[in-house]
Image (cartoon, rainbow, N blue to C red):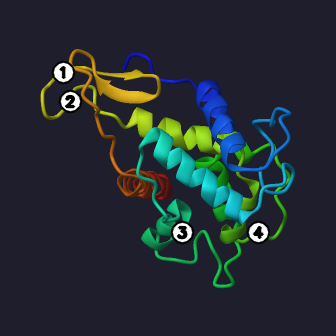
Amino acid sequence: MPNLPSLAQLADKVEELLYETAELATTPVPHDRPLMGEIGLDSLDMIELGFAMDEFFGFQFSDRNAVELLDQELGGGVLTAPTGYLTEQGRAMVLRRMPELAHLELPEPLKMVDVQQFYTLETFARLMQEFYLALPETCPTNGEAVVVVDFVPQTATSGTRVEPPSGDALIDAWVANTARELKAEAVG
């Protein structure tokens, strides 16, 4: 699809939205550093950033956790222990889902609920990229080619806005595909 924003462009836009929502110095925010711990955001700042991204990009985010849903799909207790801590497989799955966190020293043990503390601008950029990559090649209502102009998915000729799948649909697809891959790996 033409004109998809790059991860760097998406991270820059999220950084811009961050400055609009949080009280930060105007120094650049490193795209690969945790926003909560190292940059100084709190949970309210993260929520406000999420709302700002939702408003700007127009994508419907999910409030569900993909790794927890995958654990349920696998029968439970595979990725998270009953205590809420990630198992070794759970940590590996978090990094598979969020490869931008691989360079960070995540604490051991780590609860899934605490992973949000390590989200970076790259985390949000990757999330936005998932929405863009899920856009249809052609508009389902008029058959026109879909392009992205100034971060807005629209039809190439008439400029009609094209809606991506919801965040819930993206997570459901990831869970189904990943569960299928893991089950195939276990058999093979």
Of the residues shown, which amino acid type is indicated by label 1?
Glu
Image coordinates for residue 45, horizontal then vertical, percent: 70, 57
Q: Earlier in the sequence, mark 4 or mark 3?
A: 3
Q: Amino acid at mark 3?
A: Glu
Identify which amino acid the numbered label 4 is placed on. Leu
How far is the residue under mark 4 from the one under mark 3?
A: 14 Å
Q: Earlier in the sequence, mark 1 or mark 4?
A: 4
Name the residue beneath numbered marker 1: 144
The local secondary structure at tag 4 comes to loop
Q: Are marks 1 and 4 in contact (CB under 8 Å)?
A: no
Is residue 78 visible in the rendered image? The answer is: yes
Q: Earlier in the sequence, mark 2 or mark 1?
A: 2
x, y percent for residue 180:
40, 55
Residue at which label 4 appears? 110
Q: CA distance from mark 1 to mark 3?
A: 37 Å
Label 1 element class: loop
Residue corresponding to mark 2: 139
